[in-house]
Image (spheres, grey):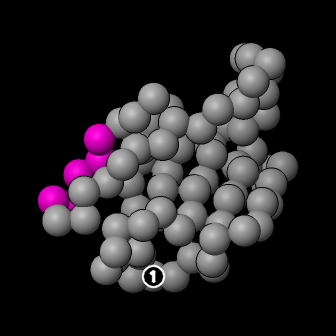
């Protein structure tokens, strides 16, 4: 897993593998975009938008993650 921060765009990229065009992507909440494996529905990449402002909001950095039903391709937010 790799973590890359783009300071100019203020985006944190978390990657299990390099992104590829066939991935499905969806905003899963609070300016977080997940990229899914099109066959399994597994999250392979996460983009956290406005990363630096998140760090200023709280002492704890949390990423809201949703569980995605691979059949319906709908995210169900979890806490």
Residue at label 1?
Answer: 21
User: How many other residues sit within 10 Å of disc 1, few (<14), some (14-19) or many (≥20)?
Assistant: few
Q: Which residue appears farthest toward the top when viewing the image?
A: 58
The image quarter containing residue 29 is: top left
* Residue 2 coordinates in the image, percent (x, y): 76, 67
Could you say which is closer to the camera, residue 74 or residue 11? Answer: 74
| Whether residue 45 can be seen here | yes
Q: Is residue 14 above or below residue 9?
A: below
Could you say which is closer to the camera, residue 49 or residue 59? Answer: 59
Question: Seen in the image, is 15 located left or right of residue 28?
Answer: right
* Residue 51 coordinates in the image, percent (x, y): 72, 38
Residue stretch rendered in magenta on the structure: 72-76
Q: Is residue 73 magenta?
A: yes
Instruction: Residue at 29%, 41% (x, y): give it.
Output: 76
Q: Secondary structure at mark 1?
A: loop
* Residue 7 coordinates in the image, percent (x, y): 84, 49
Quarter of the picture containing the N terminus is bottom right
Q: Which residue appears farthest toward the left when viewing the image?
A: 72
- Report the predominant secondary structure element of the magenta stretch: strand
Q: Is residue 6 above or below residue 61?
A: below
Quarter of the picture containing the C terminus is top left
Question: Seen in the image, is 69 located left or right of residue 31?
Answer: left
Q: Is residue 22 above or below residue 25?
A: below
| Whether residue 31 can be seen here | no
Instruction: Residue at 64%, 32% (x, y): give it.
Output: 62
Question: Seen in the image, is 78 located left or right of residue 5?
Answer: left
Instruction: Residue at 68%, 59% (x, y): give it.
Output: 14
Could you say which is closer to the camera, residue 31 or residue 61? Answer: 61
Instruction: Residue at 42%, 67% (x, y): give it.
Output: 42
* Residue 65 coordinates in the image, percent (x, y): 48, 42
Q: How many marks?
A: 1
The image quarter containing residue 3 is: bottom right
């Amino acid at each position: 897993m790799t973590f890359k921060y783009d300071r100019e765009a203020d985006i944190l990229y978390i990657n299990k593998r390099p992104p590829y065009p066939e991935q499905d992507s969806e905003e899963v909440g609070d300016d977080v975009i997940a990229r899914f494996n099109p066959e399994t529905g597994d999250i392979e990449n996460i983009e956290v938008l406005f990363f630096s402002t998140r760090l200023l909001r709280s002492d704890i950095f949390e990423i809201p993650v949703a569980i995605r039903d691979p059949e319906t391709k709908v995210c169900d937010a979890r806490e």
